[in-house]
Amino acid sequence: MAENTPVLSMKNIGKAFSGNQVLQDVSMDIMPGEIYALCGENGAGKSTLMNILFGMPVISSTGGYTGKVYLEGEEVHIKSPQDAIVHGIGMVHQEFMLIPGFSVGENIKLNREPLKSGALSRVFGKNLRNVDFEKIREDSREALDKLGVDLDVNADVQSLPVGYMQFVEIARELDKSNIKLLILDEPTAVLTESEAEIVLGIIKRLSKMGIAVLLITHRIGEIMEVADTVTILRDGVNVKTMKIADTTAGEIAELMVGRELVAVQRQDKNESEEEKKEVAVSIRNMKVEMPGERVTGIDLDVYKGEILGIGGLAGQGKLGIANGIMGIYPTTGEVTVFGQPLKLNSPKDSIAAKLAFVSEDRKRQGFAPDLSIEMNMVVPAMVNHDEFFKNIGPIRLIDKKKVQQTAEQYIKEFQIRCTGPKQEVRSLSGGNQQKVCIAKAILLKPDILLVSEPTRGIDIGAKTIVLETISRINREMGVTIIFTSSELGELRQICHRIAIVSGGKVVDILRADASNEEFGLAMGSK
């Protein structure tokens, strides 16, 4: 291969599903050892492009694609993931593909287990060879060492923190002897800041080893930190390809969404106003047994009509506060809502007290994936407030017209990208699923809305809409909001005050315009 030959070239790639053009004339060239970022809003065509490159069956079963793919200057026709692997392409998917109950080493060598001869194989043939577990440990250790990760190869993979599972996924690809190009799909989406930093360091290390990295991410800061080149997709079209040295984070963001990003409006309040405010939620000595986010003794007052932010490093207890108030995990202490004691450990009582919750775990707690958008929105109000029903004589029926009209209203208001109220929520992008979760909470007509990590794993355009929606709910509806996030920037963008949690306790409460040094010192407290 000539020195200036790309390891991967995709030329004029096009793809349509049922007449809907999702990719049109997309091209890219990636050089050996280059870190190449691919970004765009959900629905921009990134996943379809990767499915073509990795030979996923959904492409061939829907008529294939147009355009050409070259690896090291030679045209290839990748028809399956196995083909991609043979050609030296590896992929780490956003959803982990590890087998619980297997060790780290066994997962790294999965389907490529080294074998050794034994007494039976010498007599009856090679089909009776044994798995060479010592070789599995050696190879796995070597792959992890290349990444600079100190991890016990004998550990059960299901016992690992999420970040370490990501390291195992990358090590598995690196263990393949012919790896030339590694696709990383949102590799830091569910990681803590410290884990994400390790992954970014690994990406740089892979580049120095001559392995090209195709990085798919929504996090523009990460693109600016590690990438050499970035391609922005929008509506299936390559909007622009740029060297990172020639662009800015702001330009990338605006190219992604096709418009200038407008700052979310926050109505600032001064301290004298806060002193006069009625206390909406009062928390005293609250302890929550949430795995990985234990609360060890929270004292906190939330004023009526404010957006109170809750921030802090991962694992310090910030997520436990909302989950404790809503009765999701075992909780002790005292919580009052507008002066009335709240019965703890009872989600039903929390909802009856006019609290609503948008969980950080939207896939397990946020929505029913097989139900439609409209039913996801209205079922909690039906169950808890007896709404969306009508009586026809002695018969009580769901008011389907009202359900549909309500869903259509929120689809329009929250800019939910969908085919209509009947579409299943599982088929929506992450950002649009999150908007459905917020609409569902609002339909409970809460006085207090608790929102945890609402922008996790969604693109910048959807993030802006979600933050503006939360701010507008507070501003126009007067709903008091407790907003928990790992991203300090978005807390400062929409919150009036920000409580920093460390070691399961509130260590400081800062105004949004406090200095970076003040926030850093608070987060570093123990």
Image (spheres, rainbow, N blue to C red):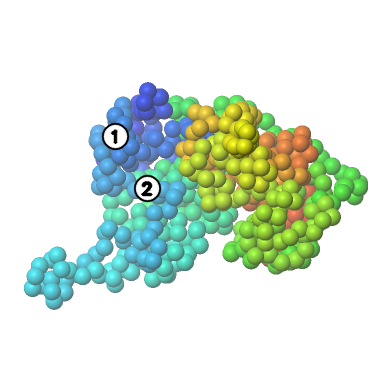
Q: Does residue 273 lie above or below 321 as drawn?
A: above
Q: Does residue 103 lie above or below 162 as drawn?
A: below
Q: Nearer the viewer, mark 2 or mark 1?
A: 1
Label 1 sits on a secondary structure element that is loop
Q: Residue furthest bottom?
A: 119
Q: Does residue 212 lie above or below 255 as drawn?
A: below
At x 13%, y 76%, the residue is: 119
Residue under label 2: 91
Would you identify the image quadrant in which residue 14 lies? top left
Would you identify the image quadrant in which residue 296 lies? bottom right
Q: Position of residue 501 (x, y in %)?
A: 71, 59
Q: Is residue 445 left or right of residue 89?
A: right
Q: Position of residue 219 (x, y in %)?
A: 55, 43
Q: Which mark is residue 457?
A: none
Label 2: how many Cα within 10 Å (few below 14, some 14–19, many 20+): many
Q: Between disc 2 and disc 1, whose residue precedes?
A: 1
Number of marks in the rendered image: 2
Question: In the rendered image, is residue 123 in sight?
Answer: yes
Q: Is residue 348 left or right of residue 271?
A: left
Label 2 sits on a secondary structure element that is strand
Q: CA distance from mark 2 to mark 1?
A: 21 Å
Q: Which mark is residue 61?
A: 1
Q: Amino acid at mark 2?
A: Met
Label 1: how many Cα within 10 Å (few below 14, some 14–19, many 20+): few
Q: Is residue 124 left or right of residue 339?
A: left
Q: Position of residue 322 (x, y in %)?
A: 68, 55
